[in-house]
Amino acid sequence: MELSVELSFYPLQDQYKKPILAFIERLKQELSIEVIPNRMSTQLFGEYDQVMSALSRLMKNSFEQYGTAVFVAKFINSDRRPKG
């Protein structure tokens, strides 16, 4: 099953940009997931199990590395990649 995710990451610290950019870079290293960042969120596309496994692992890593943070996500069980 294909999955599309819109994800926002809010580290609860004054220097919030570095953790966000590092998280996006780690997502981009997941070869089985297409990652499209923008100014408000990051979109992820791929096979359900691969996307969810990567999110679980990388979110846990972010909590351990940066402390308290908020992740907000929307999940759609289809491929909603922009066409064109």
Image (cartoon, grey):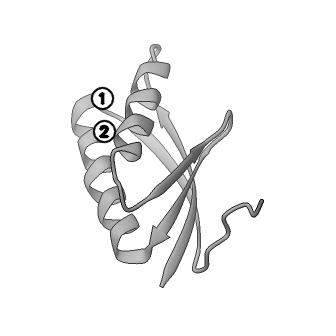
Q: CA distance from mark 1 to mark 2?
A: 6 Å
Q: Secondary structure at mark 1?
A: helix
> Dot 2 lies on which element?
helix
Q: Is residue 81 left or right of residue 49?
A: right
Q: Is residue 18 above or below residue 55?
A: above
From this view, report whether residue 23 is shown above or below residue 31.
above
Tell me residue 59's x, y (percent). Answer: 33, 48
Residue shown at the point (34%, 40%) measured from the top left: 26
What residue would you read off at disc 2?
Answer: 62
Query: In this view of the protein, which residue sits in the foreground, 8 or 78?
Result: 78
Q: Say whether residue 19 is left or right of residue 2.
A: left
Q: Position of residue 21 (x, y in %)?
A: 45, 28
Q: Position of residue 82 (x, y in %)?
A: 73, 60
| Residue at far bottom of view | 1
Comparing 16 with 1, the one in front is: 1
Residue at image position (25%, 54%) is: 57
Q: Are marks 1 and 2 in contact (CB under 8 Å)?
A: yes
Query: Disc 1 marks which residue?
Result: 66
* Residue 55 sits above or below residue 20 on the image: below
Q: Within the image, what quadrant is residue 15 found in?
A: top left
Q: Is 5 in front, or is 11? A: 5
Count of all numbered marks drawn on residues in the image: 2
Q: Please tell me which residue is depicted at 30% across the width and 48% down the height of the picture.
A: 58
Seen as rendered, the residue at the extreme top is: 14
